[in-house]
Image (cartoon, helix red, strand yellow):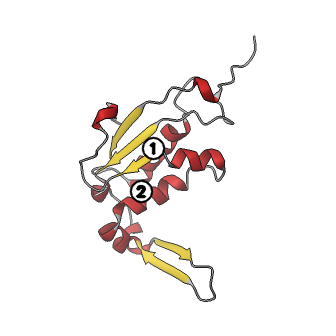
Amino acid sequence: MSTYMAKAGEISRKWYVLDAAGKPLGRVATKAAALLRGKHKPEYTPHVDCGDHVIVINCDKVVLTGNKLDQKVWYRHSGWVGGLKQVKYSTLMAQRPEKAMELAVNGMIPNNSIGRSAMTRLRVYAGSNHSHAAQKPETLEF
């Protein structure tokens, strides 16, 4: 018996909705990253992009445990001398909660072409409304 290897043309993609209200940021991001990579499927193959589409709603109601809201900082650099920018998560969650979720999921996805294509299938919304009802997404409880 040989090991099954998925092929890119044989992949069927489903749509899932994750409700982040009242749940820790990392727990939601872990579930979203696993769905984006396709690790929940029996035909998962590491070198093939076999993940699904993920819609994360209610990101403005996500919880950061401990003192992370005050102590955790998002750093980015412009590439110029002295171009280090830093934003506390208390500010980030108040102004752009979608960005906080994208950063958390992006940190759990591999830094290669498969990871970049997986991140294009992530849709993040601060509220409970999304515009993907035509795709008939199924709600996941975790």
The one of 35 and 7 positioned closer to us in this rendering: 7
Outermost residue toward the top?
A: 1
Q: At label 1, which amino acid type do we have?
A: Ala
Q: Quadrant of the N terminus?
A: top right
Q: Secondary structure at mark 1?
A: helix
Q: Quadrant of the C terminus?
A: top left
Mark 2 or mark 1: whose residue is earlier in sequence: 1
Q: Is residue 108 left or right of residue 130?
A: right
Residue 21, position as x, y percentages in the image: 27, 50
Q: Which residue is mark 1?
A: 32
Q: At label 2, which amino acid type do we have?
A: Met
Residue 25, position as x, y percentages in the image: 40, 55
Q: Secondary structure at mark 2?
A: helix
The one of 64 and 106 positioned closer to us in this rendering: 106
Query: Which residue sits at x=42%, y=56%?
Result: 101
Badge number at residue 101 = 2
